[in-house]
Amino acid sequence: MLSLINKQVLLGITGGIAAYKSAELCRLLVKAGADVRVVMTQSACEFITPLTMQALSSNRVHTELLDEAAEAAMGHIELARWADLIMIAPASANFIARLAHGEANDLLTTTCLAASAPITLAPAMNQAMWSNQNTQDNLANLKTKGRLIFGPADGEQACGDIGPGRMLEPTELIEQAANLFQTGALADLSVCITAGPTREAIDPVRYISNHSSGKMGYALAHAAAEAGAKVNLISGPVHLSPPPHINLINVESAEQMLNAATRTSCDIFIGVAAVADYRPIQKASNKIKKSKDAIQIELIKNPDILATIAAQQPKPFCVGFAAETENLESNALAKLKNKNIDLVVANHATETFNKDEASVNAYWHNGKKVLTLDRKEKIARELILLIKELM
Ligand code: C5P
């Protein structure tokens, strides 16, 4: 089963008998890991109830453009921004015509106009309507604008005709949708990513650590695997499920992370882990007892994993992260130079740690790219494309 884990899919349903299949499509999207929000046109509601779609998507269904309550919760602009992918299934001849002409006279057309995410259409109509030159012209027009047309299939139709115009089956639509995220940008390359915090033991029950959630490292591992790379994810202790199709190596301390990193050869090394800068010189063999009012723990500097990998010959393409609380740009540029890396991704530590969203500035030797606030999954996909571009 292809994965749509962490993908935000807006399912647009328009008026046609194939709308009954959208219920199954929604169920399969959710099963494939997608977070699904449904937008229905007025005529779609004649064929299938919003309540059905609400139950299957576990989200309130959107039907009105001018609905105060709905707009307050999530209006058309938010819906458009939210979506990683917009799937219109079924796409009626009328909807195809309206979209081709840039109309914005209901919630679904307006959301499509406002969206930058890919838009796919699964046409479903009578064979004569499908073959009509007007429909074909509209489809050609939509294709030139980058809209993707899934299907239709050929065969027996609800009206009794036989010919092209049947909506593709939900499983086929899911497969084509999932394939859109398999970019192949890093095909045949191996990627090693460190993620999460490290734990530096004080005694058998206590440690020094930090608040890193591992979310950005895991999102990058997922995006790299989707881009076709062989991914080794070296992770400190986090509460995240590993993304599909990656090799997870669990570690605790910085020294264990370094050992795992040096043993793993790769074309691209991405150090996202918030490695503890220092560790206790000695780990007490027994639990330290409460006695004196003040005690001291002597710390020693941890090895710099990223700099160690960047000093290897041959050297992989090295990417580092810089979570800073001040002087973002100068600190990031200093890391680029001092660690001899190829790309540094900087962000404000307080805005990023443990959050689902991030805004980052990426710096390389003679360039810079600003990625504005977005879900870490989306930022990760953009960073993977940037790495591919710079390599
Ligand atoms: O030196 P600093 O911690 O500010 O640099 C952050 C970057 O270096 C991150 O990419 C982090 O994963 C990496 N790093 C490392 N080993 C360390 C410290 C940081 O790989 N000991």
Image (spheres, rainbow, N blue to C red):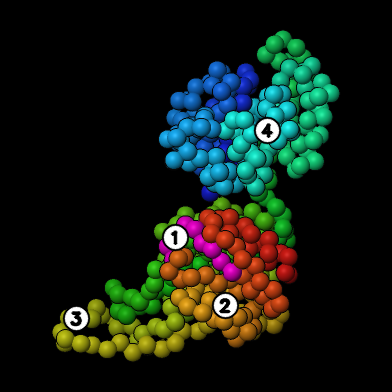
- The residue to which callout 3 is attached is 289
Q: In the image, which is nearer the foreground, mark 4 or mark 2?
A: 4
Camera-near label (3 vs 1) is 1
- What type is the residue that disc 2 sits on? Glu
Asked whether mark 2 and ligand 1 are closer than 8 Å, the reply comes as no
| Label 4 crowd bin: few (<14), some (14–19), many (20+), radius 10 Å | some
Indicate the position of residue 9 as horizontal and vertical percent values: 57, 41
Task: Check disc 3 and report its element: helix, strand or loop.
Answer: loop
Q: Earlier in the sequence, mark 1 or mark 4?
A: 4
- Measured as percent of width and height from the top left, residue 166 is found at 71, 22
Considering only order in the chain, which callout, 2 or 3, is on the residue closer to the N terminus? 3
Q: Quadrant of residue 286?
A: bottom left
Q: Which residue is mark 1?
A: 355
Cα distance in 3D space between marks 1 and 4: 37 Å
Figure check: 156 above or below 107: above
Q: What kind of element bears circle 2?
A: helix
Q: Position of residue 211 (x, y in %)?
A: 39, 68
Residue in the image at 71% along x and 77% along y: 366
User: Between 55 and 329, which is closer to the camera in this rendering?
Assistant: 329
Q: Which residues are magenta?
A: 353-361
Discs 1/4, front: 4
Alpha carbon of mark 3 to alpha carbon of mark 4: how far? 73 Å
Mark closest to the chain's N terminus, 3 or 1: 3
Q: Residue under circle 2?
A: 329
In front: 167, or 333? 333
Residue at mark 4: 103
